[in-house]
Image: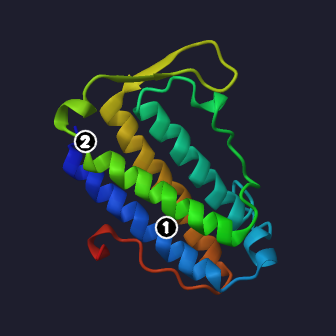
C-alpha cells in the first residue's frame, strides 16, 4: 500500500506546510488567531493545537502505545502562547521526520491497536492504513487552517504536493 519513502515524503510535506501556516499566522494578533471563524475547532489556534496533539497520539499508536491518552492529553487551548506553540510544533515535526527516517518496509506491516480514550474496546487497523491516516488527518485540518488564514488576509504558501521544495 505505502512505503517508507512515501512516509518520508509526507513528513517533509508536513514540516513544510506547518512552517507555511505558522509564518502566515505570525502576521495575526493573538486575538485573531483565537477568533471563532466557524470551523470545526472554531479558531486557527485551536485547530493547530488539535493537530499538534493528534499527531502525538497517532505517532504513539504507530510506535505501539495502545493507550497514549493516559499520558498525552489532547487540548484545543494548550499551548496558548504562540511562541510556545511554534517551538513545540517544530519539535513534533522533527519527531515525525525522525520516525519516518527509521522506517523499513517491514515496519509498515501488521496492525496498530489502541483503546480509544476512556474506552474498553480495543481497535485494530492496518499499520500502513494508520500511517496514511496520520498524514491525511494533517492535510485535512491544515486545509481548514489555510482557509481561515486566507479569509483573515494572511498568505500561506500553496499546498500542492508538487510545490514541495
Residue shown at 53%/15% (left/top)? 122
* Neighbour tally class for label 2: few under 14, some 14-19, many 20 plus, Cα within 10 Å: some
54 lies left or right of 132 = right
Which of 15/155 is in front?
A: 15
Q: Name the quarter where the C terminus is drawn.
A: bottom left
Report which residue position mark 2 lands on.
Answer: 103
**Between tags 1 and 2, which lies in front?**
2
- 81 lies above or below 77: below
Which of 40/66 is in front?
A: 66
Q: Name the quarter where the N terminus is drawn.
A: top left
Residue shown at 35%/56% (left/top)? 11
Residue 150 lies, in percent from the top left, at 60, 80
Report which residue position mark 1 lands on.
Answer: 18
**Mark earlier in primary sequence (1, 2):** 1
Residue 127 lies, in percent from the top left, at 34, 30
Residue shown at 51%/23% (left/top)? 66
Label 2 SS: loop
Amino acid at each position: 500500500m505505502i512505503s517508507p519513502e512515501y512516509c518520508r515524503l509526507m513528513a517533509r510535506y508536513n514540516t513544510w506546510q506547518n512552517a507555511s501556516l505558522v509564518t502566515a499566522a505570525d502576521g495575526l494578533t493573538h486575538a485573531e488567531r483565537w477568533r471563532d471563524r466557524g470551523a470545526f475547532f472554531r479558531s486557527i489556534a485551536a485547530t493547530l493545537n488539535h493537530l499538534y496533539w493528534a499527531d502525538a497520539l497517532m505517532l504513539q499508536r504507530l510506535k505501539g502505545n495502545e493507550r497514549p491518552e493516559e499520558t498525552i492529553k489532547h487540548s484545543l487551548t494548550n499551548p496558548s502562547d504562540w511562541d510556545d506553540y511554534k517551538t513545540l510544533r517544530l519539535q513534533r515535526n522533527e519527531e515525525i521526520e525522525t520516525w519516518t527516517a527509521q522506517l523499513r518496509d517491514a515496519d509498515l506491516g501488521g496492525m496498530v491497536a489502541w483503546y480509544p480514550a476512556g474506552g474498553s474496546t480495543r481497535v485494530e487497523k492496518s499499520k500502513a492504513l494508520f500511517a496514511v491516516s496520520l498524514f491525511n488527518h494533517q492535510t485535512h485540518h491544515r486545509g481548514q487552517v489555510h482557509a481561515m488564514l486566507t479569509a483573515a488576509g494572511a498568505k500561506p504558501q500553496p499546498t500542492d504536493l508538487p510545490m514541495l521544495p
